Image (cartoon, helix red, strand yellow):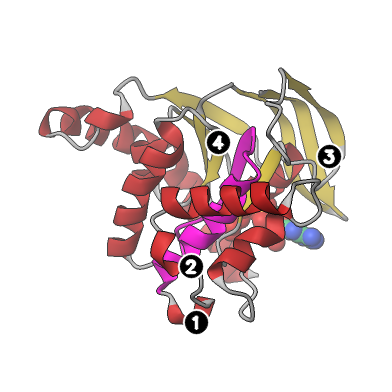
């Protein structure tokens, strides 16, 4: 499935947040969305997922949705959004409750995503018994249970410590990059963008405009190798150059506010 954004603009009352963003999320790609704080990344993700109607411009969707997909555009949130009184399996089940699945099909989907996210032994555990990384795995399992056509992720790792983040990133690669799930990934972390993405879309400071789309040609599987480090460092410098002045100005603006 592809999502096309054409001339997207958005404002919250007097605050213009996005201006003239034209961008296509391509089938099977992981697109990272980066830019300075407050430039409108989450707003753009909300527009991509149909949670928000853009003030101007058009969103169109192309392609067919697989027959077993229950929710084509599915979000993963940074704060996990788990219900503490429900077990891991029941939190995943939540995503399936309003769909016409038999009890057997539901059980099968839950078991499958728990296995794929490494939670097979934790079906009966409660969120308070899990580490932050495990909780975010539950959030991801819940998103995958509906077999989404596009995964929309808003800083899914930012609440986690660095080590857990690195481990989960490797699992992400297994889960969706190698399976070519279409994904949009909002992050502040250039390292995450460079590890996971096929392309990185860079927004300017608010009002967010598309500054550049940086394609990554090194396959994800090779990005951990020593041979890839020089090129990745070059891309990191390039991305940082694109956003640093904008980030500084945005920071000053926030400090003055
Ligand atoms: N519902 C809302 N009502 C009013 N202003 C909003 C609303 N949502 C976001 N904003 C403001 O719009 C701007 C863009 O917000 P948004 O969350 O889209 O940016 P962001 O790039 O994701 O930010 P960050 O990097 O800090 O997470 C910010 O200044 C924010 O305070």
Vertical placement of 153 versus 220: above or below? below
User: Could you tell me residue 103's position as x and y percent?
Assistant: 71, 54
Task: Give me the C-alpha separation between circle 1 and circle 4.
Answer: 29 Å
User: Could you tell me residue 215's position as x and y percent?
Assistant: 42, 22
- Residue 127 visible here: yes
Vertical placement of 106 versus 9: above or below? below
User: Could you tell me residue 24's position as x and y percent?
Assistant: 64, 22
Mark 3 C-beta closer than 8 Å to ligand 1: no
Give SS at disc 1.
helix
Residue assigned mark 4: 183
Residue assigned mark 3: 54
User: Could you tell me residue 99's position as x and y percent?
Assistant: 79, 48
Ranked by sequence position, the earlier of labels 2 and 3 is: 3
* Quadrant of the image where one finds ligand 1: bottom right
Task: Give me the C-alpha separation between circle 2 and circle 1.
Answer: 9 Å
Task: Give me the C-alpha separation between circle 4 and circle 3.
Answer: 20 Å
Task: Give me the C-alpha separation between circle 4 and circle 2.
Answer: 20 Å
Q: Residue furthest left?
A: 226
Q: Quadrant of residue 149?
A: top right
Q: Quadrant of residue 147?
A: top right
Mark 1 C-beta closer than 8 Å to ligand 1: no
Q: Nearer the viewer, mark 1 or mark 3?
A: 1
Dots 4, 3 in contact, CB < 8 A: no
Q: Nearer the viewer, mark 4 or mark 2?
A: 2
Query: Is residue 58 left or right of 74 when viewed as pictured?
Result: right
Taking the spot 23% from the left edge, 29% from the top edge, the residue there is: 222
* Pointer 2 local density, CA inside 10 Å: few below 14, some 14–19, many at least 20: many
Which stretch did the figure color magenta? 131-158
Residue assigned mark 2: 135
Taking the spot 66% from the left edge, 44% from the top edge, the residue there is: 146
- Within the magenta stretch, is there residue 138? yes
């Amino acid at each position: 499935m592809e999502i096309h954004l054409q001339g997207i603009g958005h404002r919250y009352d007097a605050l213009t947040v996005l201006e003239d963003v034209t961008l296509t999320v391509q089938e099977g790609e992981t697109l990272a969305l980066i830019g300075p704080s407050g430039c409108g990344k989450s707003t753009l993700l909300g527009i991509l997922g149909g949670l928000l109607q853009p003030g101007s411009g058009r969103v169109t969707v192309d392609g067919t949705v697989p027959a077993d997909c229950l929710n084509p555009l599915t979000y993963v949130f940074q704060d996990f959004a788990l219900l503490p009184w429900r077990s891991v399996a029941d939190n995943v089940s939540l995503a399936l409750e309003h769909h016409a699945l038999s009890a057997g099909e539901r059980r099968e989907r839950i078991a499958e995503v728990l296995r794929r996210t490494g939670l097979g032994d934790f079906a009966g555990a409660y969120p308070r018994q899990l580490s932050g990384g495990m909780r975010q795995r539950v959030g991801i399992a819940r998103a995958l249970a509906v077999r989404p056509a596009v995964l929309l992720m808003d800083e899914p790792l930012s609440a986690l410590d660095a080590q857990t983040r690195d481990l989960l990133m490797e699992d992400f690669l297994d889960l969706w990059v190698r399976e070519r799930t279409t994904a949009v990934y909002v992050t502040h972390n250039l390292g995450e963008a460079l590890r996971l993405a096929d392309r990185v879309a860079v927004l300017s400071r608010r009002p967010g405009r598309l500054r550049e789309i940086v394609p990554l040609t090194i396959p994800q599987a090779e990005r951990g190798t020593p041979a890839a480090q020089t090129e990745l460092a070059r891309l990191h410098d390039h991305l940082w150059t694109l956003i640093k002045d904008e980030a500084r100005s945005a920071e000053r603006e926030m400090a003055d506010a």
